[in-house]
């Protein structure tokens, strides 16, 4: 449930990272939601997402986005990741206009989302913030690694995988874009922001 | 996860992919520390099987070594398809249910780690005005946690007077939701992470946050904690001051339910 919440980063880094997704309430509006979820993803695809997630597949593992869209059922809860604020603003406007009736959540800087909603005549309904990390924090890797791995909230992008991709970009074995795509692969919900991954790996390379 | 030793050629691609860092190459083949593996299947899902003949791959690698050469396979393949997901039995099944986002919890019928929580709050009204929701996730990011640590935290939160979310899979493992005690046989199971979901009156927030801070020093892993609420009519966030006064810092980012779900909770209530 919090898999899109605890993304680590600075205000600047997080300002190009928006996850938009729909959720159905079981027992209330799940039945017949498939076509509505499909419509959501169609609208999202029109805005050029950097990653999408459908039925355990992402843009790297899922192949053709049109086939992924066609595979959406009542049990699907598709998501789309953007690096562009204006694309999200347009998507929110279209979702409001089409009134699909599905709950829409945006994971991003809360002040930016608030501004987007107000510009579209909407008021946020509910909100969730991270309170940070407690406990044995001395066991955690560097912030550089955490910013990459926390883009998969289910923890499927391992710290060692991020370290390897940082090393391989520094060695010139992979470009930052290629390495970001490899890191996006294990995130089956498709919420790993490939653009941001590339940006973070480029920064890491520059620090070599 | 199991690794077929007949097939494994020791390329080592699965080592960094392992979310818990518990795969290592020993004597030329990969080995999994079964005690620490959380059965997330990430290695199996991420590494494409190239289906190559193990003898052929070993021969090529041997030949290259003679010329002091090496071949780095692409980082997303298992050349021989040596990774084999095992058939799990209770209570080890919990490891996959809490660690592999593609496995559903039989207890709740849902996938992932928790529930719909505020994502459908516009429709369900789960966290209403005057109430505050908490999501206390042990093991995240990337360290994993055992259920005895979850029990420690759940008991501390129970003492602070929270109401545990009934549809949450951790709540389903409790023998008593008044005390937060979990079933004895699950306590040593390790998972990638698990979320204790609960809610309380807004007035209880200081006590709950204090309990959370205290108990965090008693666990062997990390806790990613979150707080959630229904916004005010003007979009205001009701817990800002409470959190600040308790010495916590809210994240810059968060999840916002933008209120487009239908039928609205209020409409359903009126209809009922």
Image: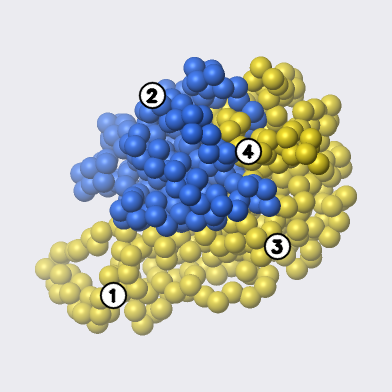
Q: Give the x, y percent position of residue A131.
A: 64, 32
Q: Select label 3 or label 4 by which is in front.
A: 4
Residue name at image x 49 percent, y 29 percent: A97
Above or below — where is B127 with respect to B112?
Answer: above
Task: Describe the element under mark 1 as helix, strand or loop.
Answer: loop
The lab-note entry on whether marks 3 and 2 share a chain reads: no
Q: Are marks 3 and 4 in contact (CB under 8 Å)?
A: no
Separation of marks 1 and 4 at Cα, in angstroms? 48 Å
Tell me which numbered mark, 1 or 3, is placed earlier along the sequence: 1
| Coloring applied to the structure | by chain
Q: Which residue is mark 2?
A: A86
Q: Give the x, y percent position of residue B106.
A: 66, 65
Q: Which residue is mark 4?
A: B262
* Image disc number at residue B51: 1
Q: Nearer the viewer, residue B22 or A26?
A: A26
Above or below — where is B263 with respect to B246?
Answer: below
Name the chain under label 3.
B
In the figure, what tint was chain B given?
A: yellow
Task: Describe the element under mark 4 as helix, strand or loop.
Answer: loop
């Amino acid at each position: 449930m919090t898999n899109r919440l605890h993304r680590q980063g600075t205000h600047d880094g997080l300002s190009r990272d928006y996850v938009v997704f729909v959720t159905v309430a079981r027992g209330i509006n799940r039945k017949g939601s498939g076509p509505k979820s499909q419509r959501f993803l169609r609208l999202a695809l029109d805005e050029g997402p950097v990653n999408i997630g459908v039925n355990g597949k992402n843009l790297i593992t899922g192949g053709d986005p049109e086939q992924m869209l066609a595979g959406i059922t009542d049990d699907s809860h598709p998501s789309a990741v953007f690096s562009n604020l204006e694309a999200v603003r347009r998507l929110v406007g279209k979702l409001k206009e089409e009134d699909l009736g599905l709950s829409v959540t945006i994971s991003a800087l809360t002040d930016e989302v608030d501004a987007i909603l107000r510009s579209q005549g909407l008021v946020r309904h509910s909100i969730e913030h991270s309170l940070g990390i407690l406990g044995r924090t001395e066991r955690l890797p560097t912030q550089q690694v955490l910013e990459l791995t926390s883009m998969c909230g289910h923890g499927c992008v391992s710290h060692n995988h991020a370290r390897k991709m940082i090393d391989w970009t520094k060695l010139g074995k992979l470009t930052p874009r290629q390495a970001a795509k490899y890191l996006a692969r294990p995130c089956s919900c498709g919420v790993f922001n490939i653009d941001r991954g590339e940006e973070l790996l480029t920064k890491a390379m520059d620090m070599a | 996860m199991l690794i077929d030793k007949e097939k494994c050629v020791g390329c080592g691609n699965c080592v960094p992919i392992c979310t818990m860092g518990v795969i290592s190459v020993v004597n030329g083949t990969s080995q999994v520390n079964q005690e620490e593996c959380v059965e997330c299947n990430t290695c199996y899902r991420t590494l494409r099987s190239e289906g190559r003949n193990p003898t052929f791959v070993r021969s090529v690698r041997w030949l290259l070594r003679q010329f002091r050469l090496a071949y780095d396979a692409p980082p997303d393949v298992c050349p021989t398809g040596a990774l084999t997901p095992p058939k799990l039995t209770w209570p080890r099944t919990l490891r996959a249910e809490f660690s592999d986002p593609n496995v559903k919890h039989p207890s709740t019928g849902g996938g992932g780690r928790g529930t719909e929580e505020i994502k459908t709050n516009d429709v369900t009204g789960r966290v209403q005005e005057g109430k505050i929701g908490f999501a206390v996730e042990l093991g995240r990011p990337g360290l994993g946690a055992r259920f005895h640590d979850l029990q420690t935290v759940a008991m501390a939160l129970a003492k602070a007077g929270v109401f545990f979310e009934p549809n949450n899979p951790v709540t389903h493992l409790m023998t008593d939701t008044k005390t937060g005690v979990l079933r004895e046989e699950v306590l040593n199971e390790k998972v990638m992470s698990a979320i204790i979901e609960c809610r309380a009156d807004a007035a209880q927030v200081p006590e709950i946050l204090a309990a959370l801070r205290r108990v965090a020093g008693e666990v062997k892993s990390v806790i990613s904690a979150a707080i959630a609420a229904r916004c005010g009519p003007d979009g205001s966030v009701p817990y800002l001051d409470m959190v600040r006064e308790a010495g916590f810092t809210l994240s810059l980012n968060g999840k916002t339910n933008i209120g487009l779900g239908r039928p609205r909770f209020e409409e359903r209530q009126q209809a009922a």
